[in-house]
Amino acid sequence: MTTTDVAADRPDLSGRAAGTALTLLYDSHARDLHHYLSRRLDPTAADDLVAETFLVAWEQRARYDPARGPARAWLFGIATNLSRRHARTEANTLRAMALAAGRATVAEAADATSASRVDAGRAARELAAGLAGLRAEERDVLLLVAWAGLRPAEIAVALELDARTVRTRLHRARTRLRAHLSREGDDG
């Protein structure tokens, strides 16, 4: 990693060039943030939360410490906190989706494509219900790994946690989700 790479990944947001640095961060990370947020919420909410993430980053630029970690992790931390606030009802929404999908009537599968769609729909319902059953802290860590592609060390920076805590939450989330999916598979 060159000095330029480090400067781009850990910019000085406290100086006169903070606006330019934040613009470069937007250009580098807005798409990934949107992808992560749209998978957690919906694309319209993701649009708003990406904009809000950079607004918060601008307002809190003096609090960013490049020595603590890369700006990408810091931005994902802001986005995760905003999504928590936005999605206080996320677990209820996932449960409602699982219930609504469970009530939908499925016509007899006429071919392999239809059967695949039915199986995918069932798997999506089971996954949604499993995610809804996780504690919010565990769900955040799991989705930051699965949907944002962050490593546990980056998540620790993003959520201001100890790396061991992140690994523990990730392990618990995976274990609980596997157990839920296994139970659902046994019932199906």
Image (cartoon, helix red, strand yellow):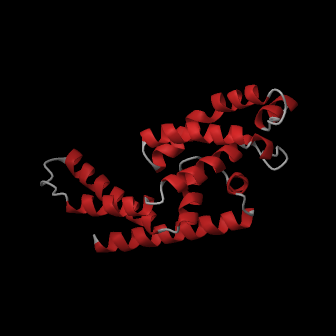
In-front residue for pair 177/141 = 141
Residue at the location (40% across, 60% down)?
127
Q: Is residue 151 left or right of residue 41?
A: right
Q: Which part of the image, by quadrant, shows the N terminus?
A: top right
Residue 181 at x, y = what percent? 40, 67
Residue 126 at x, y = what percent? 36, 63
Among the 4 quarters of the image, the one containing residue 185: bottom left
Residue 101 at x, y = what percent? 26, 58
Residue at the location (61% across, 41% down)?
53
In-front residue for pair 115/151 = 151
Residue 122 at x, y = what percent? 29, 59
Among the 4 quarters of the image, the one containing residue 55: top right
Q: Is residue 139 left or right of residue 99?
A: right
Establish if 39 lies above or below 180.
above
Residue at the location (49% across, 37% down)?
47
Establish if 33 lies above or below 119.
above
